[in-house]
Image (cartoon, rainbow, N blue to C red):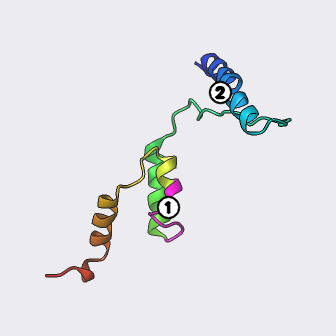
Amino acid sequence: LESIQRNVKALIEEEIVRPLVDLNFPNAKKYPSFQFRPLADKDITKLASVFNLMINTGVIAPSEDWIREELGMPAPSEEAKAELYKRNHPEEQED
């Protein structure tokens, strides 16, 4: 799989990245590189446990976008954000 990943990376850089950079920056000397995420799966359970501990001790806020990114979760919808707000602020709810 790593060999395929290297080949696809090279193809993307040569066929997509370079032409786009050349179109936008005709005198470019350096080109950005394309990077895949590592193939090794993270232990999501352990990672979530550490994040939970950090959230509960106030080290990080549960709404930090990078946490969702690290766990491979999509950004919350506006509806989900509103529901979370209601849950976390019950004193503001009408009876």
Q: Nearer the viewer, mark 2 or mark 1?
A: 2
Range covered by the magenta-colored residues = 58-66
* First along the sequence among labels 2 and 1: 2
Amino acid under disc 1: Glu
Report whether 27 appears left or right of 88: right
Residue at point 27%, 70% (across, down)? 87
Tell whether label 1 touches label 2 (CB within 8 Å). Answer: no
In percent of width and height, residue 3 lies at 64, 16
Q: Which residue is mark 2?
A: 16
The reply to whether the magenta stretch includes residue 54 is no
Label 2 CA crowd tier, 10 Å (few <14, some 14–19, many 20+): few
Q: Which mark is residue 13?
A: none
Residue at point 56%, 29% (across, down)? 39
In the depicted structure, whether residue 79 falls above or below residue 44: below
- The one nearer the camera, 1 or 43, is 1
In percent of width and height, residue 24 lies at 72, 39
Amino acid under disc 2: Ile
- The one nearer the camera, 17 or 24, is 24
Q: Which residue is mark 1?
A: 64
The reply to whether the magenta stretch includes residue 65 is yes
Which of the image's four quarters has the N terminus? top right
